[in-house]
Amino acid sequence: MKQTKFRNLCNNFSVCKNAKFVAILPTIILIVAIVLIVALGAQSGSYSDAVGIGIDFEGGTILTVTLGQDAIDNYDTNRTKITQVIESVEYEGQKVVVSYSQLQEANDANKTAIIFRYKNVHGDDASINAMNEAIRKAVDEAYPEIALANNISFESIGATAASDLLSKAGIALAVSLALILVYIMIRFTFTSACAAIIALIHDVVIMFALTVICRVQINSSYVAAMITIVAYSINNTIIIFDRCREMIKPLKGQKNIDYKGIGDQAVRASVTRTVYSTGTTMVTIIFLAILGSDTIREFCVPIILGLLAGLYSALFIATPLWATMSISFDKTKEKYAKRHSVTYDKKDDEEEIVGTVATEDEARPTQVKTAGQQQQKKKANNTVYKYSKKNTTFKKKK
């Protein structure tokens, strides 16, 4: 009984007619993400750290100190101690400031580590490497037991390389969106292309907001996940748009097409397939995130968040946008057609002439005509004609 009621509710729910309500959830997610960024940024003094931007895009060094089970048991103590050691090291009159620290758990408890991130204070690679080596020695002295096991590692990237990587990531995302726009314009319509691109922008923004809320680091793996989501999400949107196109074909040429009703029918017809395909993909990604390494997990978590955003946009964002834009486009075409329709009833360059206007037949030599022909000629001679100054021609007024 409950399943029947739920199914009837789904069948009767109009996505297009209730479009104003579907924007509530994305708005709440954005507000929460913005508040979190502002709060964490004010607390730490760095908004890039509040967002969680990795050194791939910002430049800096990640120090990984593997402490095993002790990293879990005494996390706060070890984090505070190592942070003080790192910030006490001075090289060429410069000191680093730890901007981020996090527990990095592993399947093997002996490989559990604490990671520290800090910006590089030197511009050249030689000075950066020397600074990192000085920090390594200081941590070795504070933890002589882990120095013997060589459980301290660095990962460093320069600011120039980081900015170059960020610009290339932006170009890759922009090119992919442009190619998708062109493809959908060719296969479908301009309104479908615009609606799909807006839905994809929604996916990218909401995926970023969820990433901030879940405290996922934004690095090169995140960019790869974002482009993957763009490609996956547009697939679900195209399937729904294809249904819409099939339903509109018999109605071409008609006025006042019910685009919202067509959109609702297309969503209902595609919702099962869309949910099942996204769900099966998400199950696979979740298992990869649980069983995989840290590198794989950094890629899988953004994928999961992006799948949720893409599913929502395909069902509740893209189709209502398409219906609304199609209605507006038809109204615009109708207004344009009325405004630019050509009429010759009365214009400034025309004037009515009542009288005799010689036609080709009347200009020929006169012949003997019957009384009926003369009556017809008289009637024709009193016909109202319009003379166009622009075209210098006569037209019979209807």
Image: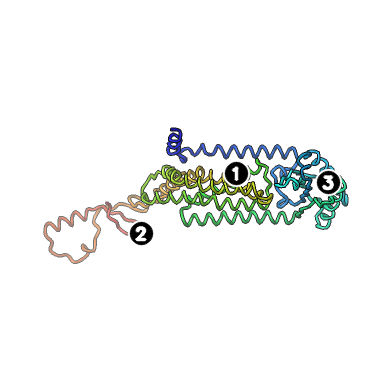
Verify CB contact (< 8 Å) between mark 2 and mark 1. no
Q: Relative to 25, is 129 on the left or the right?
A: right
Q: Tell me, yes or no, if residue 236 can be seen here.
A: yes
> Marks 1 and 3, Cα distance to the nearest angstrom?
36 Å
User: Residue at the spot x=21%, y=63% of the render?
Assistant: 361
In the picture, residue 38 is in which quadrant?
A: top right
For badge 3, the amino acid type reads Ile
Residue identified by numbered label 2: 391
How is the protein colored in the picture? rainbow
Q: Residues within 10 Å of mark 3 (few under 14, many from 20)?
A: many
> Marks 3 and 2, Cα distance to the nearest angstrom?
89 Å
Residue occupying the far top of the picture: 1
> Marks 2 and 1, Cα distance to the nearest angstrom?
61 Å
Q: Secondary structure at mark 1?
A: helix
Q: Residues within 10 Å of mark 2 (few under 14, many from 20)?
A: few
Q: Residues within 10 Å of mark 1 (few under 14, many from 20)?
A: many
Q: Secondary structure at mark 2?
A: loop
Foreground pick, 206 / 328: 206
* N-terminal label among 1 and 3: 3
